[in-house]
Amino acid sequence: MSVYTFSQWVLFFYIYCFLGWVFESTYVSIMEHHLVNRGFLKGPFLPIYGSGALCVLIVTIPFRDNVPLMCLSGMTAATLLEYVTGAAMEKLFHVRYWDYTGKFLNINGHICLMSTLCWGAMTLLVVDVLQVFLEDLVLAVDEQVVTVVVFVLTPFLTADLVTSFRTAIHLRDILIHWERISEEMQKLEAQRRELEAALAERRREMETAISRRRQELETALDEQRRGMETALNEQKRVLETALDERKRGMETALDERKRSLETAFDERKRGLGNAPGERKRDLGFSFDERKRELETAVTQYRQELEASLVRRNRELTDKAAALQEKVSRMKVEGDLMQKMHGKSIGNLLKRNPKAVSIMNREAFAALKQSLARKTGEPADPEDAAGTADPETTVETAHMEVAAERVSDPGNRQNGTNK
Protein backbone atom coordinates (compact mmCIF):
# COMPACT_ATOMS: atom_id res chain seq x y z
CA MET A 1 0.00 0.00 0.00
CA SER A 2 1.27 3.45 -0.89
CA VAL A 3 1.87 6.18 1.64
CA TYR A 4 -0.96 8.72 1.54
CA THR A 5 -0.97 12.38 2.41
CA PHE A 6 -3.43 13.81 4.93
CA SER A 7 -5.64 15.23 2.16
CA GLN A 8 -5.74 11.85 0.45
CA TRP A 9 -6.76 10.10 3.68
CA VAL A 10 -9.55 12.63 4.17
CA LEU A 11 -10.71 12.17 0.58
CA PHE A 12 -10.75 8.39 1.07
CA PHE A 13 -12.85 8.96 4.18
CA TYR A 14 -15.36 11.05 2.22
CA ILE A 15 -15.52 8.51 -0.61
CA TYR A 16 -16.22 5.61 1.76
CA CYS A 17 -18.81 7.70 3.61
CA PHE A 18 -20.58 8.25 0.29
CA LEU A 19 -20.33 4.59 -0.76
CA GLY A 20 -21.70 3.54 2.63
CA TRP A 21 -24.62 5.92 2.16
CA VAL A 22 -25.32 4.46 -1.30
CA PHE A 23 -25.25 0.91 0.09
CA GLU A 24 -27.40 1.67 3.15
CA SER A 25 -29.95 3.80 1.28
CA THR A 26 -30.34 1.19 -1.44
CA TYR A 27 -30.73 -1.68 1.03
CA VAL A 28 -33.18 0.15 3.31
CA SER A 29 -35.19 1.51 0.36
CA ILE A 30 -35.66 -2.04 -0.93
CA MET A 31 -36.66 -3.30 2.53
CA GLU A 32 -39.01 -0.36 3.19
CA HIS A 33 -40.46 -0.36 -0.36
CA HIS A 34 -39.86 3.38 -0.78
CA LEU A 35 -36.90 5.71 -1.15
CA VAL A 36 -35.04 6.31 2.11
CA ASN A 37 -32.27 8.86 2.65
CA ARG A 38 -30.31 6.83 5.15
CA GLY A 39 -28.09 8.65 7.59
CA PHE A 40 -27.54 10.80 10.63
CA LEU A 41 -26.49 13.64 8.31
CA LYS A 42 -28.72 15.37 5.80
CA GLY A 43 -26.19 14.92 3.00
CA PRO A 44 -25.27 11.65 1.24
CA PHE A 45 -22.67 10.55 3.78
CA LEU A 46 -22.50 7.88 6.49
CA PRO A 47 -19.50 8.62 8.74
CA ILE A 48 -19.58 5.17 10.35
CA TYR A 49 -18.65 3.57 7.00
CA GLY A 50 -15.89 6.06 6.33
CA SER A 51 -14.48 5.55 9.82
CA GLY A 52 -14.82 1.78 9.52
CA ALA A 53 -13.08 1.68 6.15
CA LEU A 54 -10.13 3.76 7.33
CA CYS A 55 -9.91 1.71 10.51
CA VAL A 56 -9.81 -1.50 8.44
CA LEU A 57 -7.18 -0.09 6.08
CA ILE A 58 -4.91 0.96 8.96
CA VAL A 59 -5.37 -2.09 11.21
CA THR A 60 -4.82 -4.63 8.42
CA ILE A 61 -1.49 -3.17 7.20
CA PRO A 62 0.63 -5.77 9.09
CA PHE A 63 -1.51 -8.69 7.83
CA ARG A 64 -1.90 -8.02 4.10
CA ASP A 65 -0.09 -11.27 3.22
CA ASN A 66 -2.27 -13.38 5.55
CA VAL A 67 -5.91 -13.28 4.44
CA PRO A 68 -7.46 -14.96 7.57
CA LEU A 69 -5.58 -12.64 9.94
CA MET A 70 -6.39 -9.63 7.78
CA CYS A 71 -10.09 -10.52 7.79
CA LEU A 72 -10.08 -11.21 11.54
CA SER A 73 -8.24 -8.01 12.47
CA GLY A 74 -10.42 -5.81 10.22
CA MET A 75 -13.59 -7.48 11.46
CA THR A 76 -12.57 -7.03 15.11
CA ALA A 77 -11.51 -3.40 14.74
CA ALA A 78 -14.64 -2.39 12.80
CA THR A 79 -16.93 -4.22 15.25
CA LEU A 80 -15.27 -2.52 18.19
CA LEU A 81 -15.65 0.85 16.45
CA GLU A 82 -19.32 0.17 15.79
CA TYR A 83 -19.98 -0.76 19.42
CA VAL A 84 -18.18 2.26 20.86
CA THR A 85 -19.90 4.62 18.42
CA GLY A 86 -23.37 3.17 19.07
CA ALA A 87 -22.95 3.22 22.86
CA ALA A 88 -21.59 6.78 22.83
CA MET A 89 -24.43 8.07 20.61
CA GLU A 90 -27.08 6.41 22.78
CA LYS A 91 -25.49 7.83 25.91
CA LEU A 92 -25.35 11.31 24.41
CA PHE A 93 -28.60 11.45 22.41
CA HIS A 94 -30.81 8.87 24.26
CA VAL A 95 -31.54 7.33 20.83
CA ARG A 96 -30.19 4.24 19.06
CA TYR A 97 -29.72 5.09 15.41
CA TRP A 98 -29.20 1.40 14.69
CA ASP A 99 -30.44 -1.45 16.84
CA TYR A 100 -29.60 -5.16 16.65
CA THR A 101 -31.81 -6.15 19.58
CA GLY A 102 -33.30 -9.57 18.83
CA LYS A 103 -30.51 -10.48 16.42
CA PHE A 104 -28.43 -13.58 17.08
CA LEU A 105 -25.52 -13.01 19.49
CA ASN A 106 -26.12 -9.27 19.86
CA ILE A 107 -24.41 -7.24 22.60
CA ASN A 108 -26.64 -4.51 24.05
CA GLY A 109 -28.21 -4.06 20.61
CA HIS A 110 -25.11 -2.24 19.28
CA ILE A 111 -23.40 -5.17 17.51
CA CYS A 112 -24.33 -8.71 16.55
CA LEU A 113 -22.82 -11.73 14.82
CA MET A 114 -24.26 -10.85 11.41
CA SER A 115 -22.91 -7.29 11.47
CA THR A 116 -19.50 -8.59 12.55
CA LEU A 117 -19.43 -11.05 9.63
CA CYS A 118 -20.44 -8.24 7.29
CA TRP A 119 -17.50 -6.19 8.57
CA GLY A 120 -15.28 -9.16 7.80
CA ALA A 121 -16.61 -9.35 4.25
CA MET A 122 -16.24 -5.57 3.96
CA THR A 123 -12.59 -5.90 5.03
CA LEU A 124 -11.86 -8.19 2.09
CA LEU A 125 -13.90 -6.03 -0.29
CA VAL A 126 -12.25 -2.77 0.81
CA VAL A 127 -8.64 -3.99 0.97
CA ASP A 128 -8.54 -6.22 -2.11
CA VAL A 129 -11.03 -4.49 -4.42
CA LEU A 130 -12.24 -1.00 -3.59
CA GLN A 131 -9.01 0.40 -2.20
CA VAL A 132 -7.02 -0.87 -5.19
CA PHE A 133 -9.35 0.95 -7.57
CA LEU A 134 -9.71 4.11 -5.43
CA GLU A 135 -5.97 4.26 -4.81
CA ASP A 136 -5.24 4.32 -8.56
CA LEU A 137 -7.97 6.90 -9.04
CA VAL A 138 -6.90 9.26 -6.23
CA LEU A 139 -3.16 8.95 -6.89
CA ALA A 140 -3.78 9.76 -10.53
CA VAL A 141 -5.19 13.15 -9.52
CA ASP A 142 -2.85 16.00 -8.76
CA GLU A 143 -2.36 16.43 -5.02
CA GLN A 144 -3.31 20.09 -5.17
CA VAL A 145 -6.62 19.14 -6.79
CA VAL A 146 -7.21 16.63 -4.00
CA THR A 147 -6.50 19.33 -1.42
CA VAL A 148 -8.94 21.73 -3.11
CA VAL A 149 -11.67 19.06 -3.23
CA VAL A 150 -11.16 18.27 0.46
CA PHE A 151 -11.08 21.98 1.29
CA VAL A 152 -14.42 22.48 -0.51
CA LEU A 153 -16.17 19.42 0.93
CA THR A 154 -15.04 19.78 4.55
CA PRO A 155 -17.05 22.95 5.43
CA PHE A 156 -20.24 21.45 4.03
CA LEU A 157 -19.81 18.17 5.93
CA THR A 158 -18.82 20.03 9.08
CA ALA A 159 -21.88 22.29 8.88
CA ASP A 160 -24.09 19.26 8.21
CA LEU A 161 -22.56 17.43 11.17
CA VAL A 162 -23.01 20.40 13.52
CA THR A 163 -26.63 20.93 12.41
CA SER A 164 -27.51 17.25 12.79
CA PHE A 165 -25.73 17.12 16.15
CA ARG A 166 -27.73 20.09 17.45
CA THR A 167 -30.96 18.58 16.15
CA ALA A 168 -30.21 15.30 17.93
CA ILE A 169 -29.48 17.22 21.14
CA HIS A 170 -32.80 19.07 20.83
CA LEU A 171 -34.56 15.74 20.29
CA ARG A 172 -32.90 14.37 23.44
CA ASP A 173 -33.99 17.42 25.45
CA ILE A 174 -37.59 17.06 24.28
CA LEU A 175 -37.62 13.35 25.10
CA ILE A 176 -36.29 14.07 28.59
CA HIS A 177 -38.87 16.82 29.04
CA TRP A 178 -41.68 14.51 27.96
CA GLU A 179 -40.46 11.86 30.38
CA ARG A 180 -40.68 14.43 33.17
CA ILE A 181 -44.23 15.28 32.09
CA SER A 182 -44.99 11.56 31.99
CA GLU A 183 -43.73 11.12 35.55
CA GLU A 184 -45.76 14.09 36.78
CA MET A 185 -48.87 12.74 35.04
CA GLN A 186 -48.30 9.36 36.67
CA LYS A 187 -48.03 11.07 40.06
CA LEU A 188 -51.19 13.06 39.33
CA GLU A 189 -53.04 9.93 38.27
CA ALA A 190 -51.86 8.08 41.39
CA GLN A 191 -52.97 10.95 43.61
CA ARG A 192 -56.31 11.09 41.82
CA ARG A 193 -56.84 7.39 42.53
CA GLU A 194 -55.79 7.94 46.13
CA LEU A 195 -58.22 10.84 46.45
CA GLU A 196 -61.06 8.80 45.02
CA ALA A 197 -60.21 5.90 47.33
CA ALA A 198 -59.98 8.26 50.34
CA LEU A 199 -63.30 9.88 49.49
CA ALA A 200 -64.98 6.51 48.99
CA GLU A 201 -63.53 5.22 52.26
CA ARG A 202 -64.61 8.38 54.08
CA ARG A 203 -68.09 8.09 52.64
CA ARG A 204 -68.31 4.45 53.72
CA GLU A 205 -67.15 5.42 57.20
CA MET A 206 -69.78 8.18 57.36
CA GLU A 207 -72.54 5.87 56.21
CA THR A 208 -71.43 3.21 58.68
CA ALA A 209 -71.23 5.75 61.53
CA ILE A 210 -74.64 7.23 60.68
CA SER A 211 -76.19 3.78 60.40
CA ARG A 212 -74.66 2.71 63.71
CA ARG A 213 -75.78 5.94 65.40
CA ARG A 214 -79.29 5.55 64.01
CA GLN A 215 -79.48 1.99 65.28
CA GLU A 216 -78.30 3.13 68.70
CA LEU A 217 -80.91 5.89 68.81
CA GLU A 218 -83.67 3.57 67.62
CA THR A 219 -82.65 1.02 70.24
CA ALA A 220 -82.67 3.72 72.92
CA LEU A 221 -86.09 4.92 71.78
CA ASP A 222 -87.45 1.37 71.82
CA GLU A 223 -86.05 0.79 75.31
CA GLN A 224 -87.56 4.05 76.58
CA ARG A 225 -90.89 3.25 74.92
CA ARG A 226 -90.93 -0.21 76.51
CA GLY A 227 -89.94 1.29 79.87
CA MET A 228 -92.72 3.87 79.70
CA GLU A 229 -95.30 1.25 78.71
CA THR A 230 -94.14 -1.03 81.52
CA ALA A 231 -94.35 1.79 84.08
CA LEU A 232 -97.80 2.79 82.82
CA ASN A 233 -99.09 -0.78 82.98
CA GLU A 234 -97.59 -1.24 86.46
CA GLN A 235 -99.27 1.88 87.77
CA LYS A 236 -102.52 0.82 86.13
CA ARG A 237 -102.37 -2.57 87.86
CA VAL A 238 -101.60 -0.91 91.19
CA LEU A 239 -104.59 1.42 90.86
CA GLU A 240 -106.88 -1.42 89.76
CA THR A 241 -105.74 -3.54 92.70
CA ALA A 242 -106.26 -0.68 95.12
CA LEU A 243 -109.66 -0.06 93.60
CA ASP A 244 -110.68 -3.72 93.99
CA GLU A 245 -109.50 -3.84 97.59
CA ARG A 246 -111.30 -0.65 98.42
CA LYS A 247 -114.40 -1.94 96.76
CA ARG A 248 -114.37 -5.18 98.71
CA GLY A 249 -113.85 -3.31 102.02
CA MET A 250 -116.70 -1.01 101.28
CA GLU A 251 -119.05 -3.93 100.48
CA THR A 252 -118.39 -5.54 103.90
CA ALA A 253 -119.21 -2.29 105.76
CA LEU A 254 -122.38 -1.70 107.55
CA ASP A 255 -125.57 -1.74 105.62
CA GLU A 256 -126.57 1.56 107.04
CA ARG A 257 -123.60 3.13 105.58
CA LYS A 258 -123.88 1.23 102.34
CA ARG A 259 -125.55 4.06 100.53
CA SER A 260 -123.08 6.64 101.72
CA LEU A 261 -120.11 4.34 101.15
CA GLU A 262 -121.36 3.52 97.67
CA THR A 263 -121.64 7.23 96.97
CA ALA A 264 -118.13 7.82 98.31
CA PHE A 265 -116.87 4.80 96.45
CA ASP A 266 -118.34 6.04 93.17
CA GLU A 267 -116.72 9.40 93.67
CA ARG A 268 -113.44 7.78 94.58
CA LYS A 269 -113.71 5.47 91.56
CA ARG A 270 -114.26 8.36 89.22
CA GLY A 271 -111.26 10.13 90.75
CA LEU A 272 -109.02 7.07 90.47
CA GLY A 273 -110.30 6.31 86.94
CA ASN A 274 -109.02 9.67 85.67
CA ALA A 275 -105.50 9.27 87.14
CA PRO A 276 -104.13 6.65 84.64
CA GLY A 277 -105.19 8.79 81.65
CA GLU A 278 -103.42 11.85 83.00
CA ARG A 279 -100.27 9.82 83.76
CA LYS A 280 -100.39 8.30 80.30
CA ARG A 281 -100.57 11.74 78.69
CA ASP A 282 -97.58 12.90 80.76
CA LEU A 283 -95.51 9.87 79.76
CA GLY A 284 -96.45 10.28 76.08
CA PHE A 285 -95.36 13.93 76.10
CA SER A 286 -92.03 12.99 77.70
CA PHE A 287 -91.45 10.25 75.10
CA ASP A 288 -92.18 12.58 72.14
CA GLU A 289 -89.83 15.22 73.54
CA ARG A 290 -87.03 12.67 73.99
CA LYS A 291 -87.59 11.37 70.46
CA ARG A 292 -87.28 14.89 69.03
CA GLU A 293 -84.05 15.43 70.97
CA LEU A 294 -82.55 12.18 69.62
CA GLU A 295 -83.54 13.03 66.03
CA THR A 296 -81.98 16.49 66.41
CA ALA A 297 -78.75 14.89 67.68
CA VAL A 298 -78.68 12.51 64.67
CA THR A 299 -79.21 15.40 62.23
CA GLN A 300 -76.46 17.47 63.87
CA TYR A 301 -74.01 14.53 63.81
CA ARG A 302 -74.72 13.89 60.14
CA GLN A 303 -74.20 17.57 59.27
CA GLU A 304 -70.84 17.56 61.10
CA LEU A 305 -69.69 14.47 59.15
CA GLU A 306 -70.77 15.99 55.82
CA ALA A 307 -68.97 19.27 56.63
CA SER A 308 -65.81 17.29 57.46
CA LEU A 309 -66.09 15.41 54.16
CA VAL A 310 -66.52 18.69 52.23
CA ARG A 311 -63.42 20.18 53.89
CA ARG A 312 -61.39 17.03 53.12
CA ASN A 313 -62.61 17.02 49.51
CA ARG A 314 -61.65 20.69 49.12
CA GLU A 315 -58.13 20.03 50.47
CA LEU A 316 -57.61 17.06 48.12
CA THR A 317 -58.99 19.06 45.17
CA ASP A 318 -56.56 21.92 45.90
CA LYS A 319 -53.62 19.48 45.91
CA ALA A 320 -54.74 17.97 42.60
CA ALA A 321 -55.13 21.46 41.09
CA ALA A 322 -51.59 22.37 42.18
CA LEU A 323 -50.19 19.24 40.51
CA GLN A 324 -52.22 19.94 37.37
CA GLU A 325 -50.85 23.47 37.24
CA LYS A 326 -47.29 22.14 37.54
CA VAL A 327 -47.89 19.70 34.67
CA SER A 328 -49.40 22.51 32.57
CA ARG A 329 -46.30 24.65 33.09
CA MET A 330 -44.08 21.75 32.01
CA LYS A 331 -46.26 21.23 28.92
CA VAL A 332 -45.91 24.93 28.02
CA GLU A 333 -42.12 24.59 28.29
CA GLY A 334 -42.27 21.50 26.07
CA ASP A 335 -44.41 23.35 23.50
CA LEU A 336 -41.83 26.13 23.29
CA MET A 337 -39.05 23.60 22.70
CA GLN A 338 -41.14 21.86 20.03
CA LYS A 339 -41.91 25.13 18.17
CA MET A 340 -38.21 26.03 18.14
CA HIS A 341 -36.85 22.68 16.95
CA GLY A 342 -39.89 20.71 15.66
CA LYS A 343 -39.04 20.82 11.94
CA SER A 344 -35.41 19.72 12.25
CA ILE A 345 -36.35 16.92 14.68
CA GLY A 346 -39.05 15.71 12.31
CA ASN A 347 -36.50 15.57 9.49
CA LEU A 348 -34.03 13.64 11.65
CA LEU A 349 -36.64 11.02 12.56
CA LYS A 350 -37.71 10.68 8.93
CA ARG A 351 -34.12 9.94 7.97
CA ASN A 352 -33.94 7.29 10.70
CA PRO A 353 -37.24 5.32 10.66
CA LYS A 354 -35.71 2.39 12.58
CA ALA A 355 -34.19 4.44 15.38
CA VAL A 356 -35.23 3.50 18.93
CA SER A 357 -34.81 4.98 22.41
CA ILE A 358 -34.27 2.65 25.34
CA MET A 359 -34.01 5.45 27.93
CA ASN A 360 -37.17 7.32 26.75
CA ARG A 361 -39.08 4.50 25.07
CA GLU A 362 -42.69 5.74 25.41
CA ALA A 363 -41.97 9.36 24.46
CA PHE A 364 -39.92 8.33 21.42
CA ALA A 365 -42.55 5.81 20.26
CA ALA A 366 -45.29 8.47 20.52
CA LEU A 367 -43.16 10.90 18.49
CA LYS A 368 -42.58 8.34 15.71
CA GLN A 369 -46.26 7.33 15.66
CA SER A 370 -47.29 10.96 15.23
CA LEU A 371 -44.76 11.46 12.44
CA ALA A 372 -46.10 8.40 10.62
CA ARG A 373 -49.68 9.70 10.86
CA LYS A 374 -48.71 13.14 9.56
CA THR A 375 -46.82 11.79 6.54
CA GLY A 376 -49.31 9.02 5.80
CA GLU A 377 -46.62 6.36 6.03
CA PRO A 378 -47.22 2.98 7.71
CA ALA A 379 -46.14 2.99 11.35
CA ASP A 380 -43.53 0.62 12.70
CA PRO A 381 -45.41 -2.42 14.15
CA GLU A 382 -43.19 -2.38 17.23
CA ASP A 383 -43.99 1.30 17.86
CA ALA A 384 -47.68 0.68 17.21
CA ALA A 385 -47.66 -2.23 19.65
CA GLY A 386 -46.22 0.00 22.33
CA THR A 387 -48.82 2.78 21.95
CA ALA A 388 -51.99 1.20 20.47
CA ASP A 389 -53.79 0.32 23.73
CA PRO A 390 -56.51 2.92 24.41
CA GLU A 391 -56.39 2.07 28.12
CA THR A 392 -52.75 3.16 28.48
CA THR A 393 -51.87 5.78 31.06
CA VAL A 394 -52.74 9.47 30.74
CA GLU A 395 -49.19 10.52 30.10
CA THR A 396 -48.96 8.58 26.77
CA ALA A 397 -51.93 10.52 25.42
CA HIS A 398 -50.28 13.81 26.34
CA MET A 399 -47.01 12.72 24.70
CA GLU A 400 -48.82 11.85 21.44
CA VAL A 401 -50.51 15.28 21.40
CA ALA A 402 -47.16 16.95 21.88
CA ALA A 403 -45.61 14.71 19.23
CA GLU A 404 -48.16 15.88 16.63
CA ARG A 405 -46.93 19.42 17.18
CA VAL A 406 -43.32 18.37 16.59
CA SER A 407 -43.79 16.52 13.31
CA ASP A 408 -43.66 18.47 10.00
CA PRO A 409 -46.01 17.02 7.34
CA GLY A 410 -44.39 19.13 4.59
CA ASN A 411 -40.96 17.55 4.86
CA ARG A 412 -40.65 14.43 2.72
CA GLN A 413 -37.12 13.34 3.59
CA ASN A 414 -36.86 9.86 5.19
CA GLY A 415 -34.16 7.72 6.74
CA THR A 416 -32.38 5.97 9.60
CA ASN A 417 -28.75 6.18 10.56
CA LYS A 418 -25.62 4.64 11.76
Image (tube, rainbow, N blue to C red):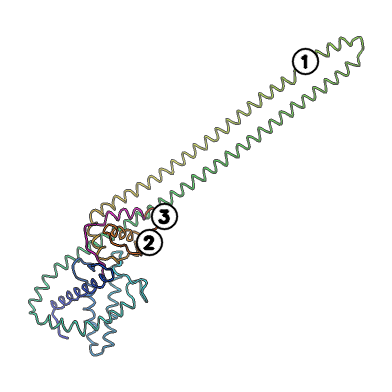
**Region of the chain picked out in magenta, as a range:** 396-417
Amino acid residing under circle 3: Glu
Q: CA distance from mark 2 to mark 3?
A: 12 Å
Q: Residues within 10 Å of mark 3 (few under 14, many from 20)?
A: few
Q: Which residue is mark 3?
A: 391
In the image, residue 226 above or below residue 120: above
| Total tally of numbered discs in the picture | 3
Q: Secondary structure at mark 1?
A: helix
Give the mark nearer the N terminus: 2 vs 1.
1
Q: Residues within 10 Å of mark 2 (few under 14, many from 20)?
A: some
In the image, residue 276 above or below residue 137: above
Foreground pick, 231 / 404: 404
Quadrant housing residue 220? top right
Give the mark nearer the N terminus: 2 vs 3.
2
Foreground pick, 304 / 118: 118
For residue 81, the mark is: none
Amino acid residing under circle 2: Gly
Q: Secondary structure at mark 3?
A: loop
- In screen coordinates, is 369 left or right of 222? left
Q: Which residue is mark 2?
A: 386
In the image, residue 373 above or below residue 223: below
Whether tag 1 and tag 3 are in contact, CB under 8 A, the answer is: no
Amino acid residing under circle 1: Gly
Quadrant housing residue 75? bottom left
For residue 271, the mark is: 1
In the image, residue 248 above or below residue 365: above
